[in-house]
Amino acid sequence: MSRLNEYLSNQPGVGGVSQRVGPYIDCSDLFKIYKRADLEVVALRGLDLAVESGELIAVIGASGSGKSTLLNILAGLDRPSAGRVMVGNRDLLDVSDDDLVMYRRSEVGFVWQATARNLVPYLSVADNIELPMALTGQLAKERRAWADELQESLGISDKGKRFPYQLSGGEQQRAAIAVGLANKPPLLLADEPTGELDTENADSIFKMIGGLNRSYGVTVVMVTHYTGVSQYVDRVVHIRDGRIGSETFSRPDYRRDGDIVEDEYVVVDKSGRLQLPSELADRFRSGGLAKIGMEDGQIKIDTPRINPRQTRGRS
């Protein structure tokens, strides 16, 4: 059995269990509202997002845009206030606490930015990787075999007996990724996995995550500020003010010796709303008017030369 088939055979919805038709992750009109005393903070406001099984995406956005809130909801660490969020066959808006525990334990892996949250400091690398498997009752022989394979895949096969404090930052994150994949989850989430690393180590981590995505078919959603991430993922999702504003795709431009170019597309949500890219939005005053129309098959948005609000009622 190939590594991919073996990995997939351990995932929910594969190997005899029916799978839901459609995207693996399907967020529709998703809201998250935090209430503190008399203050309400809307972190997500009608967000729509679909991620196919086996896809590798990055989510970027300014601080407070809602990207970490989205990741926490997908991880089962927080519950949405309204809308719909399906991950596989689970509706995370309508799931019991016990089912949510099982979901976090076996169906999703999580990699935190802070390595202290990923690894138990008094356990070796190998024991850290085996710990999630032990909690689900896997046999010792199976745990060791899978831990060894993960360490080899992540380039830390010679670090198994070391403790986290004996590893470099890049090695700690590789070990953290191995822990996230220990129970062979169909979904891996990563919150700023390279936030504490230099550019060279960050590139290495992204390449390894991409390799794991291709080898095992695991769906990956990463939150990052890393500007060069587009070359390592299938697409980059831009979140602004709690909604998906645009998506960026990278492609080689053979007219320029195969240089990588990025194409950004505005996302039209299910209600027909769209967010203008920030550089275009600056042209329009908040609450002002814009004129929209079709010309040669293209949508054109422009500011009116004469403000009809100011001229209305004049003779």
Image (cartoon, rainbow, N blue to C red):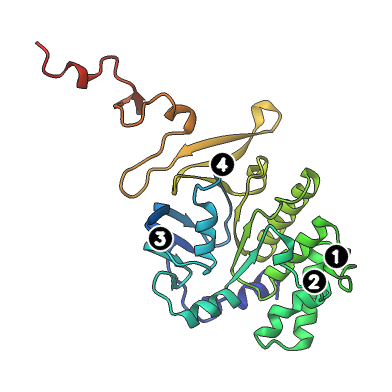
Residue type beneath disc 2: Pro
Sequence-wise first label, 1 or 2: 2
| Nearer to us in this view, 259 or 141 | 141
Residue under the image location 40 percent in, 60 percent down: 37
Rendered view: 164 above or below 222: below
Residue type beneath disc 1: Tyr
Classed neighbour count for the residue bearing mark 1: other residues with Cα under 10 Å, few (<14), some (14–19), many (≥20): few
Q: Marks 4 and 3, Cα distance to the nearest angstrom?
A: 42 Å
Q: Which mark is residue 37?
A: 3
Residue 291 pos. (x, y %): 29, 25
Q: Badges 1 and 2: C-beta atoms under 8 Å apart?
A: yes
Q: Which mark is residue 165?
A: 1
Residue type beneath disc 4: Phe
Residue under the image location 74 percent in, 62 percent down: 115
Say which element carries label 2.
loop
Rendered view: 252 above or below 102: above
Residue 266 pos. (x, y %): 44, 38
Q: Is residue 106 visible?
A: no
Q: Which part of the image, by quadrant, shows the C terminus?
A: top left
Residue type beneath disc 3: Ala
Q: Marks 4 and 2, Cα distance to the nearest angstrom?
A: 39 Å
Sequence-wise first label, 4 or 2: 2
The residue wearing badge 4 is 249
Between marks 1 and 4 in the image, the one whose residue lies nearer the viewer = 1
Classed neighbour count for the residue bearing mark 2: other residues with Cα under 10 Å, few (<14), some (14–19), many (≥20): some
The residue wearing badge 2 is 121
Q: Is residue 124 visible?
A: yes
Residue under the image location 25 percent in, 18 percent down: 307
